Amino acid sequence: METLGRHLLVDFHGCDPALLDDPAHLETALRQAAESAGATVLGASFHRFSPCGVTGVLVLRESHLAIHTWPERAFAAADLFTCGRLDPWLAGVRLKEALRARRAEAVELPRGGPPLEALSRPL
């Protein structure tokens, strides 16, 4: 049975802290990640916290991409959910490059199909 979507949860370690604290960079990075997966962006919302950190989301025709950053820990967490035949791993690879992450770990959850069975691997 096919699934309705693929939900990728990614932890990015060893990122460039300056990039993690820049909402404009993060929006561009998520937009490029969406493009690399073949997704269509419908809207965006980003917020910078004080003293640091950013949360942001892109609403896609095919679901969403979201990120939350901790510059002080050189860490970001992303939620990459795509529906249809799109591959969220392509978005994850692009985002890893944009954040200059030294390491990324991802778990994929199939959505809307057989019972959940996670697939975990390095990105």
Image (cartoon, rainbow, N blue to C red):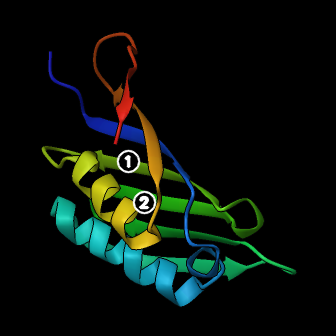
Q: Which amino acid, by three-letter code, is at mark 2?
A: Leu
| Horizontal side of residue 54 vs 110, given as left or right | right
For image coordinates 48% across by 85% down, the residue present is 25
The image shows residue 117, relative to residue 69, as above or below, that is: above
Q: Residue 6's spot in the image, x, y percent? A: 30, 37
**Residue receiving disc 1:** 81
Q: Which amino acid, by three-letter code, is at mark 1?
A: Phe
Residue density around tag 1, few if under 14, some if 14–19, many if 20 or more, within 10 Å: many
Residue lying at the far right in this picture: please name it: 51
Q: Residue 100's spot in the image, x, y percent? A: 44, 68
Residue lying at the far top in this picture: please name it: 115
- Please state, as top left, top right, bottom left or bottom right, where the N terminus lies in the image: top left
CB contact under 8 Å: marks 1 and 2? yes
Front one among 58 and 53: 53
| Horizontal side of residue 3 vs 123, given as left or right | left
- Please state, as top left, top right, bottom left or bottom right, where the C terminus lies in the image: top left
Q: Residue 35's spot in the image, x, y percent? A: 21, 71
For image coordinates 42% across by 37% down, the residue present is 106
Residue 65 is labelled as: 2
The image shows residue 54, relative to residue 119, as above or below, that is: below
Q: Residue 26's spot in the image, x, y percent? A: 50, 78
